[in-house]
Image (cartoon, rainbow, N blue to C red):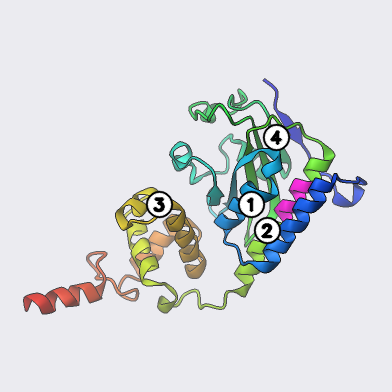
Amino acid sequence: MQMEKIGWLPIQSVNLEAPPVIHTRIADFVAQLAANDLTEDELCEYLVTNTLSFLGVTGAWICEITNRQTVRARASFGVDQSQFSQWQEFPLDWKLPVNDALREQRFLWINTLPHWPEEYTTLHQVNLSPAIKSMIVIPVLRIGNSNGCLGFFSNQALNPDMELELMLRTVTNLVSLQITRQKNRKTVDSASVNSLTDRQLHILSLISQKLTNGEIAEQMGYSESTIRQETMRIFDKLQVQGRHEARTYFEANKIKLGFTSKSNTPLEVVKDFQEATGS
């Protein structure tokens, strides 16, 4: 079973006249970024439904390396969460395509799907749709403050070539730039209690109970995508890396955040109950 791997090539060394469709798609993506402040999930959605649709791309995702040497999913679109729910965060030293691309800073290209290459034994239990033929992972030097990558699934058995690599590298750099700009525009005091909305406080309390995004979404009545976006905003505001640090922050700041010391019930709810019962 063959797996194609592409190494990094400096952009300035590539002298190609890209097909018009590539010029058009890149120009459209740049215009979209200039006109709209897209969230990370919306970036993934636009790439799937517009920029890369001519390549049969059906799913896109963004991952980052945390300071605990784990890889964490930041955003996605078109990816079956029931198949990848356990891959929201995983150790960087596991043998996985995303990890190989991140550790070695190279394109990783698999065009034998839905069959995984033999070396990725951990993924053999993941049964992809028969329609998926290719997976591409492109590392970037920075997503916010962490090394990260952009990945895609395609229903075409894509063969690697210089033009396509150049386009995907350009798209990845634009996504990274957009995320960095969003972070730099934030002026909220990250440690301020008032920086979290009521919904974010509720989500944080559920994270402290070790609930997954899917479980939180079901309990609160929101989509899993909404919970994931809110979770990332919470991490950014509190300047924490992942759920473990968020739980630690919550336990250390329960009262400051408006929760009782013995439970995850907001103090205002306790006061309302006491007033209603006369206790």
Alpha carbons under labels 2 and 4: distance apart: 20 Å
Amino acid at pointer 3: Asn
Q: Is residue 46 above or below residue 205?
A: above
Image coordinates for residue 3, horizontal then vertical, percent: 70, 27
Q: Which residue is mark 3?
A: 213
- In the rendered image, which residue does mark 2 sit on? 176
Q: Position of residue 6 (x, y in %)?
A: 77, 36
Residue 156 in the magenta stretch? The answer is: no
Q: Secondary structure at mark 3?
A: helix
Q: Is residue 246 left or right of residue 118?
A: left
Are the residues at dot 2 and dot 1 in contact (C-beta closer than 8 Å)?
Answer: yes
* Magenta-colored span: 167-173
State the separation of the CA atoms marked 4 and 1. Answer: 16 Å
Q: Determine which residue is flagged by label 4.
A: 109
The residue at 60%/46% (across/down) is 60
Q: Nearer the viewer, residue 11 or 133?
A: 133
Residue identified by numbered label 1: 148
Q: Is residue 94 above or below residue 250?
A: above
Residue 28 falls left or right of residue 126: right
> Nearer the N terminus, badge 4 or badge 1?
4
268 horizontally vs 222: left or right: left
Choose top left, top right, bottom left or bottom right for residue 41.
Answer: bottom right
Q: Nearer the viewer, mark 2 or mark 1?
A: 2
| Gap in angstroms between the C-alphas marked 2 and 3 | 24 Å
Q: Which image quarter is the C terminus in?
A: bottom left
Residue found at x 79% / y 52%: 24
User: Does the image show residue 149?
Assistant: no
Q: Residues within 10 Å of mark 4 (few under 14, many from 20)?
A: many
